[in-house]
Image (cartoon, rainbow, N blue to C red):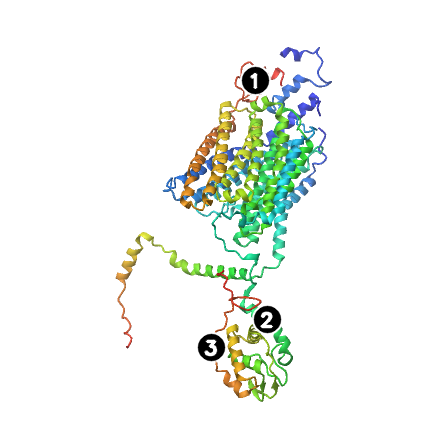
Amino acid sequence: MEPNQRDTPLRRFNTFWWGLGLFVVFAVASLIFSAVSPKSEDAQTDRRRERTKFKAATVESQKAVLDAKVPVTVVYDELGKSLVAAKPTASTKPVEQ
Amino acid sequence: MSTESTQQMAEDATLRAEIDRSLRHPVMFFFTSGAAWLAVSLLLGIIATAKSFAPGFLSCVDCLTYGRTFAAHMNVLLYGWCAQAAFGTMIWLMSRLSRQPSQSSGVILTVGHAWNAVIALGTIGILSGNGSGQPWMGFPNFVWPCLIVLYAAIAIWSVIQFRVRRGGHVFISQWYILAALFWFPWTLLTAHVFIHVIGDGHPVFATAINAWFRSGLLFLFFTPIAIASAYYLAPKVTGRPVYSYSLALFGFWALAVVGPWAGMQKLYGAPIPVWLQYAGAGATILLLIPAIAVSVNILKTVSAKGETVAHSPSLRFSVAGIIGLAATALFAAALALPGSMSLTQFSIASYGFDIFALYGFFSMCMFGAIYFIVPRITGREWISTKFIRVHFWSSIYGVVFIALFCGLLGGYLQGQAVENFSEPFASAMGRYKIYTIGMAIGWVFVLLANFFFCFHLLLMWLRLGRRSNHPTLLKHNAHGQVHGPEGDLDSLQSPTS
Amino acid sequence: MVQKYADSTKPDLEEGTNVAATHARLTDASAAAEREKVLRENGMEPVSLWVVLGCFAVVLIAGGVFFKGGNYFNNAAFVAANYQQGEEPGGDTGPVLEPAFKAYMAKGKGLYAQKCAACHGGDGNGNPGFPPLTGSEYVVDNARVVTMIALNGVAGPIVVKGKTYNSNMAAQAVGLNEYELAGLITYIRNSWGNEGDVMSIEQAAEILADSDSRGGSQLSGDEAIEMIQDKLKAAPLSKEQLVDKKTGIIVDATEG
């Protein structure tokens, strides 16, 4: 068989990079387009952002309590022990009537 | 082209053998690992379906809750079996049709191993509760960038092969494969980028893009690969030309134009713009056109050669798959209209449709391709016609049972019961319990089929196939043939068919 | 059979082709590849009329879906009997909502430029003879004073930020409705470094009522100073509260 005229290293190199480029071109174009398009400015979107920020802050602050190392089945025993071990402190004076 | 000199034929045969030898390792790896993942997916599917009617089944195992098992089942089916079968078929077909051996087999094989590793990690991720929760995109978030990169490393070589081919005619299958080569990264990357990067977690947007992706992956990647393999096998095995070239051309462009629009009709009633919904529905109906074109073309090509279809395992599976294509398109169109969607939208009909499309159409075509390709790349023939027969009939029974009876019928009846204003919801859901039992039974049939298929494939992989130059045909009596009993090595001197 | 091919008296198929040698070479190649038929795609059968009719029927159905479109995909058409749906007749999408701060500032900006900027300056720093509004105790501490001044004007000497101004201001804000007045005052009290709150419509109504009962004569400098201590009874709006952009009224998005 006569040698394949179309099979050159340059053509292979070209096709390699053009092919990879074509695989991703739509996604890249979408990313660029979305980056330069104006952000939506309606109240519902602002509210959503506030809400998600607020929720993230709440979850963060409650994490320490929720991630207790003590499993549910023994937590009351632990609580009881810690209450018994706690020293009694003076209570405040009763309010003057 | 109708009269070939013996010299030309000999050269062709040598070239074919060289191509097959060059692609031996990657293609065989894709097929065997794909079949293994199919088995895993079927087991997970049986567990998930069993939990639908017996929630206590395996409830002691934490990682096998319904949500995790079902998600793992679908994603393993898609990316473990369907994608790998598609890759193996696509690189072999493109190599054969571009008439050049592959120079990147080592790379493809390595990347194939990496693909399997990533899928395995992803499955573990889903079963440990870190899945993304999106149907068909359920792997944890680290997986999809890997899939894109690995796919590029597998597929770019086929693109290069197409470009540096000798020139001359481009065969029908090559159009479909070339299109699929670009449509797969387009749909996968677009869907993931839009949901994870651009959409910024907006839930309705993510659901809409996901619905589009599910349809796009099926109709723009799996469908063209299956059609390409059928267009190759039908003329190849029967020896007849493809029925109508212009119909093939028309079918391809119809799919290309209509395919990307379908998908968002699945979100009928959701707070997305209504034009997306009815454009999706219209496009899904229009997909009947390429389905009609392809199935008429293929079936007419093989119509005069009924015996060949019955005897050749690859052609039998491919023809069954093409009938499955027509049925899938019909099923999709039926489910796309509001009249039926009001009943089936939240029922098991959508799952039945997915399984019918992925198994009853795509997998059957892939089995046909595998039964053709594996003897060529291993140099052995299939050992047992019984295994192939069991594989074929169990698959058909199983998938038809699941999709039509349980999916379609069950879905409609479930929907009707739920819509019945006076019937309590619990009793309406109880009606469809029998259909989930049916689905589990159907999956058991399919698992049986796959067991035989896997075993058979494993034997071939271990080079334990039959040494012969006669193909394994599904004929009922091997005696009295012109070519003598199977396994004759000295039949080289007798005239070949 | 073997002798036939090795018989040198029989001609080969082509000159230079030794079939036996070719076949022997192919024992190395896959027998499966050897027996494959050549691929042919040049079938030129005419497409059957049934295919055309079938495709045409599909296009008709799909076209019907496209053109019926939104009416066909209208959820209301497929709702089951006895199902109660609440829906606004006419498909009104409702008012445009904005955070109160944004809406009222926008409202006030235009009015300020129109009515106040000529004398008090576009940047609120005043002009020779006219007091500044930036950091002015009549503006920052209490909404009542600045509103009454705007509604009634002020005559005679007045001390602002240590300096005495002795000129005459006519009532500028007469004829504004409650939303406009609240917007103007909000703008003055929240611009150029001033930090106040958003005046609500109730507050504006309260001050308008007080102003009416006063009779409309100009304030004096002493009266203005006295009013600084006099807080409004009604409450201001919170800045994030969503209001109808057109009317300034609070819209609770969770209702309706």
Q: Residue at x 65, y 31 (%)?
A: C50
Graded by Cα atoms within 10 Å as few (under 14), some (14 to 19) or many (20 or more), the crowding at tag 3 reads few
Residue that numbered label 2 is attached to: C107
Task: Name the residue at the right extreme.
Answer: C15
> Nearer the viewer's eye, disc 3 or disc 1?
3
Q: Is residue B77 visible?
A: yes
Residue B427 position (above or below residue C19) = below
Specify the amino acid type for callout 1: Leu
Marks 3 & 1, CB-CB < 8 Å contact: no
Residue C233 position (above or below residue B174) = below
- In this view, the residue in front, B464 or B442, is B442
Residue that numbered label 3 is attached to: C233
Q: Position of residue B176 (x, y in %)?
A: 63, 36
Specify the amino acid type for callout 3: Lys
Q: Secondary structure at mark 1?
A: helix
- In this view, the residue in front, C44 or A50, is C44
Residue that numbered label 1 is attached to: B489
Chain name for mark 3: C
Chain name for mark 2: C
Gap in angstroms between the C-alphas marked 2 and 1: 96 Å
Picture quadrant of residue C119: bottom right
Residue B148 position (above or below residue B1) = below
Marks 2 & 1, CB-CB < 8 Å contact: no
Specify the amino acid type for callout 2: Lys
Q: Earlier in the sequence, mark 3 or mark 2?
A: 2
Marks 3 & 2, CB-CB < 8 Å contact: no
Graded by Cα atoms within 10 Å as few (under 14), some (14 to 19) or many (20 or more), the crowding at tag 1 reads few
Q: Position of residue C109 (x, y in %)?
A: 60, 72
